[in-house]
Image: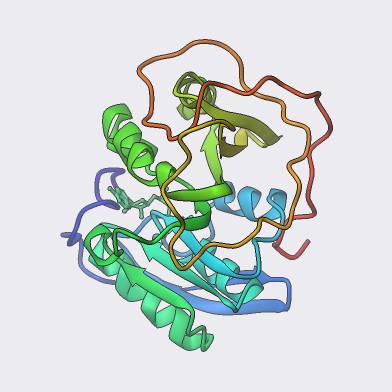
Amino acid sequence: MSPAQYFETDPAVPSQPFEVDLVLPGGKVRLVSDRGVFSTGRVDPGTSALLKAAPAPPGTGNLLDLGCGWGPIAVTLASAAPATVVWALDVNRRALALVADNAARLALANIRPVTEADIPAGVRFAEIWSNPPIRVGKDALHDLLGTWLPRLVPGGRAWLVVQRHLGADSLATWLSAGGWTVRRAASKSGYRILEVRPAAGPGPVPAAGPGSFPNPKPAPGPTPVPGPGAGPVPNPGAGPVPNPGARPVPGPGIAAP
Ligand SMILES: C[S@@+](CC[C@H](N)C(=O)[O-])C[C@H]1O[C@@H](n2cnc3c(N)ncnc32)[C@H](O)[C@@H]1O
């Protein structure tokens, strides 16, 4: 599949569903993917790396899977945190139908497959998880992150996975320059796992919507990505927070070993 196809609204390539196994902490589940959707027939290695490296999500609130594809991240979050609402967002309607199908297979009633227009303006996210669509191009990627990162609740955070050779470090630099606190939480097999937090300070994200909750996990010692970068991302907080000291990568991850 050419890289341009997976983020089409209605993929031109004919449907050809594939079964795909996803390993959850409770065991392996069989889901469905399709042509015309990112990572047809397998869990993308970057997605896998993210699910292994990031700690479990909070138990309540709204979670966003930004660019959900057929739903490996959304399904993992929804099954790890059944009291949350997992908004599975994509532009690709075939992907959204697959997420709905996969949620139904696992009786995960807390997944909402949505397009941007379906998410009420007041919804704020406790966490955003994403294997973002790098191939849409830098400007579109920056717009996407600039739209959704400011909708984290105060104390919320985003987990992103990006391939090093597809610009993970320059993306981190750009986020830092926009005032986000970025920590490289893991680096494995060419993938960077980035934890992104609003910087502390005045001007926080507007009052939280239904997803408001106290974040149960203290932030581990950041290893911020330094340096100036390109144009800023809209950020509700103040400038970058200084590094309180580097500590090793946290978190057991939510994927089964
Ligand atoms: C790299 S794929 C990741 C898919 C899935 N999360 C996974 O891990 O397999 C990125 C996804 O972002 C979606 N996407 C592209 N542009 C988008 C946008 N503006 N809003 C939401 N999703 C978008 C693509 O359709 C694609 O499904």
Name the outermost residue toward the top: 228
Q: Position of residue 163 (x, y in %)?
A: 53, 34
Identity of the residue drawn at 79% across and 44% down: 250
User: Total marks drawn?
Assistant: 0
Q: Is residue 171 left or right of residue 139?
A: right
Q: Position of residue 134 (x, y in %)?
A: 38, 37
Residue 210 in view: yes
Q: Could you say which quadrant of the image residue 92 lies in?
A: bottom left
Q: Position of residue 142 (x, y in %)?
A: 34, 32
Residue 73 position (above or below residue 242): below
Q: Is residue 19 left or right of residue 9?
A: right
Q: Front-most of 90 and 244?
A: 244
Quarter the C terminus occupies: bottom right
Q: Could you say which quadrant of the image residue 240 lies in?
A: top right
Identity of the residue drawn at 27% across and 51% down: 7
Q: Is residue 231 left or right of residue 32?
A: left
Identity of the residue drawn at 51% across and 32% down: 202
Name the outermost residue toward the right: 247
Identity of the residue drawn at 71% across and 48% down: 53
Residue 47 position (above or below residue 211): above
